[in-house]
Amino acid sequence: MKRLIGTLCALLLLTATAGAQTKVIQKSSKKMPSWVGTVADDHLVVSVVANTLAEAQDKAMTEVTERIIEGVASHVAVTQTNQMSEVNVNGNIDSRESYDRLSKIKSANLPFLKGISSSKIEAVYWEKVQDKSTKRESYNYSVLYPFSDAEHSKLLAEFEALDAEKVAEYKALEQKINEIEAVEEIKSCITQLTTLEEYFFDEVRLTQVTGLKTRYKQLYDALSVVGTFVEDGKYQCQVLLEGSPVRVSVIPKVTSNCAAQLSAVPTDGMFIVTYDAIDCLPEEENFLSIVFRIDGKKLEHKAYLADAQTVTGKGSFCVVPEGKLILTADSVDAASRKVFNLNIRLTLNNRGGTAFGLKSIELHVPDFSAPIVFDDIDGVYKTKGVLQIKALAEGEFTALQQKKSALSFVQGSITFVNPETGAVERTRLSLPYVTNFD
């Protein structure tokens, strides 16, 4: 309360100075109340100058509101501008000063301000005065508004709790931007940040919120679609956000320049697109167009049917990782989150039916911060169709307390030796997985 005295005294000083050049021509009561021009206990005493009584009443309540704001939210930003205007009235220049005060805190954003009301004013005193030299009339208007130390402490506690809640909400959104698991979360987070923009009234935090909101909007540009032909008439695709799988609730629209009987079905966070290419001519550039409409934005992916020739095994090398990756630890220490000796089982589909060499496997498992790498495998496989690859990663591994993504996809790559060319080829891997230590 004491820090408000300086503002009050300055205002009273200006009023007293102006009063020496004016005369009172009307007042609300014969005698000026004793509280005018003082600092009253458990009250705010506010004095303003205005051209009309209605304007004075509004300015007084604005002043009361801003004084309470300043007493509760100490870092409130209040913009004040003084404007001078001249109006030619019957050949005379009327110079006037209009005082505009704009508070960046709105009552809709701070619940405690809703309790401020003119009905609580305990007393009012006003004087209609006339400038002796210009004959211009105005009103000196004072109000006595109850605002005790106890109420100040109560409002301060409420404000600090609300402010801490808003800061925590911002921090959570700041962290979540790297942990998006579903595309729909982007829009939800942007909506939350818009609400926070309406709350934060200081430039520093407002700039941070606006910047984070921009980063969330840019995530839409980081979306992509990848896929592969899994068999004749079937294409598997999924949406990635900055290279990592994300869930999408919308079903993509699939069209083609030649294929018919098109459909898309969600499966394990992916989409299986089926089609009939019987009318597709091999000499033409045939494709599937897969389009996602996500929050008003178009995400398009084309799959060229010529690539399906390799996958269907028509005389070409084609080995595709599929199914679920299974991770089994020999033993687990739940308290320390340590696992010992990881047994890994990976399913490969040798669709081409030709012998191939397996050189290395690199797995990025969400449970672990470091990749699991198997080098110099030098295995040769001749089986056509589905086969199981088993590997043992010996040693001690520390599992994270929380997975980076609840989608539970292992990313990585497999290096093969192409028997047709002898060249070493690298194939991307993105598979759901299960463990015995979650």
Image (cartoon, rainbow, N blue to C red):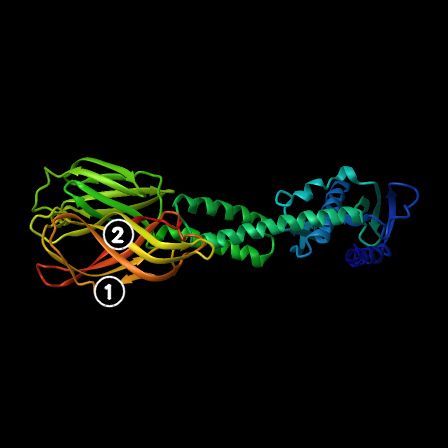
Furthest-bottom residue in view? 376
Label 1: few (<14), some (14–19) or many (≥20) C-alpha neighbours in 10 Å: few
Q: Is residue 273 visible?
A: yes
Viewed as shown, does residue 248 lie left or right of 321?
right
Secondary element under disc 1, as helix, strand or loop, is loop
User: Which numbered disc, 2 or 1, marks the residue closer to the eye?
Assistant: 2
Distance from label 2 to label 1 (Cα)? 16 Å
Q: Which residue is mark 2?
A: 345
Residue 293 picture location, percent across and down: 33, 41
**What label sits on residue 149 in the rendered view?**
none
Residue 113 picture location, percent across and down: 69, 44
Residue 171 picture location, percent across and down: 53, 54
The quarter of the displayed image where residue 412 is located: bottom left
Q: Amino acid at mark 1?
A: Asp
Secondary element under disc 2, as helix, strand or loop, is strand
Viewed as shown, does residue 332 lie left or right of 314?
right
| Position of 272 relative to 95 (above/below) | above
Q: Which residue is pictured at 39% across the width and 52% down the height?
A: 219
Q: Is residue 136 visible?
A: no
Q: Which residue is mark 1?
A: 375
Furthest-top residue in view? 261
Label 2: few (<14), some (14–19) or many (≥20) C-alpha neighbours in 10 Å: some
Furthest-right residue in view? 31
Q: Which residue is pictured at 78% across the width and 49% down the height?
A: 48
Q: As rendered, which of 165 and 72 lies closer to the eye?
A: 165
Viewed as shown, does residue 381 lie left or right of 227?
left
Q: As rendered, which of 369 and 166 lies closer to the eye?
A: 369
Q: Which residue is pictured at 27% across the width and 37% down the height?
A: 265
Q: Quadrant of the N terminus?
A: bottom right
Q: Amino acid at mark 2?
A: Arg
